[in-house]
Amino acid sequence: MKTRQARGLLVLVAIVSALLCWELAGRRSRVVRLMLSHPSLVARYAKTQHRSLVRAVATTAFESTAGLALACSVAGLLALSCLYVPSLYRVFLPPVLASQVIPLVTLAPFFILLFGIGVTSKIAMAALLCFFPIFLAIWTGMRSIPRQIHEFLTVYGATRGFRIRHVYVPMALPSILAGIRVAALLSVIGAVVAEFNGAEWGLGKNLYLAAKRLEPELMVLSLVGTSIIAAGLYAFVDLVERRSCRWYLGNNRSAFEFGE
């Protein structure tokens, strides 16, 4: 407990020190003021424009969350299909890899033309960006199950559905959730990049406008908003793992995390 309090106090001191240095640098340097503003002006801007900022954060958060959920659903269905028919993996892998090497900036206008300027195109973009880590994590986790487990299930005549539902998926959960953690961060990037190319609301549009209008306060607040969304999605996945996967977390993880 004392270690946690000491670390919390250290983090608080570091944050306050960084804000004070930023404030002094912003007041004394015109370059810093133009590029990053300073905390007092950022707070004043947030107070006057809080409604539009909240709406932008809510829009990007919805697009990121929906894109992550869509990617999890599609990746799960494809991975399960590959388990039932292993030859499908060789069919799905080339187009999936091709979708990941194409630059996002070139894909965003295509999605806007296909789905419109609304949130649908942003959700599709976020889903495309975070699909591959989830698919690969599911497939790798299930393929890494020891051969002895397969032989044991074969001896007892377990059906394919029973194996997937009661053995394969639970044993692959550590790998699956690790992939979803990575995808949670990528979904925010996908939504923001899609908003850069046209959106009614969103943090990506705010970042574009901030660069165009030279409004560093809007840029800083938008970056803070994207960080909050990414941290929230990551924390949600971590909470799901802690609540539903205690059987493999045990006490080792807490000892590793807190150095006990």
Image: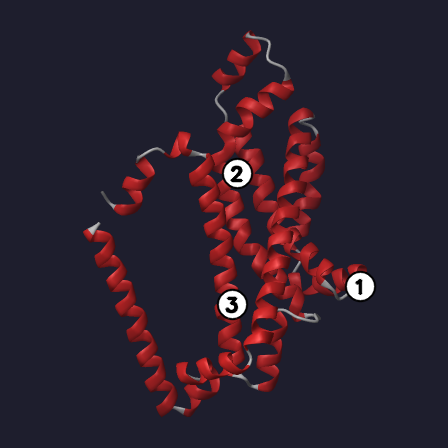
Residue 225's tag is: 3
Residue at 58% x, 60% y: name it. 61
- Measure how far apart labels 1 and 2 are at the Cα level: 33 Å
Residue at 78% x, 63% y: name it. 116
- Determine whether 152 is above or below 124 in the image: above
Discs 3/1, front: 3
- Closer to the camera, 13 or 134? 13
Dot 1 crowding, Cα within 10 Å, few <14, some 14–19, many 20+: few
Q: Earlier in the sequence, mark 1 or mark 2?
A: 1
- Determine whether 85 is above or below 110 in the image: above
Left or right of 172? Residue 194 is right
Measured from the top left, where is residue 6 in percent x and y?
21, 58
Give yes or no for contact between labels 3 and 1 (Cβ–Cβ under 8 Å).
Answer: no
SS for callout 3: helix
Residue at 68% x, 34% y: name it. 90
- Determine whether 20 is above or below 66 in the image: below
| Amino acid type shown at disc 2 | Ile
Residue that mark 1 sits on: 113
| Amino acid type shown at disc 1 | Leu
Res. 242 image quadrant: top left
Residue that mark 2 sits on: 176
Dot 3 crowding, Cα within 10 Å, few <14, some 14–19, many 20+: many
| Amino acid type shown at disc 3 | Gly
Give yes or no for contact between labels 3 and 2 (Cβ–Cβ under 8 Å).
Answer: no
Measured from the top left, where is residue 56 in percent x and y?
60, 69
Measured from the top left, where is residue 243 in percent x and y?
44, 38
- Measure how far apart labels 3 and 1 are at the Cα level: 27 Å
Q: Earlier in the sequence, mark 3 or mark 2?
A: 2
- Closer to the camera, 208 or 51? 51
- Colouring style: secondary structure
Measured from the top left, where is residue 194 in percent x and y?
66, 64
Q: Earlier in the sequence, mark 3 or mark 1?
A: 1
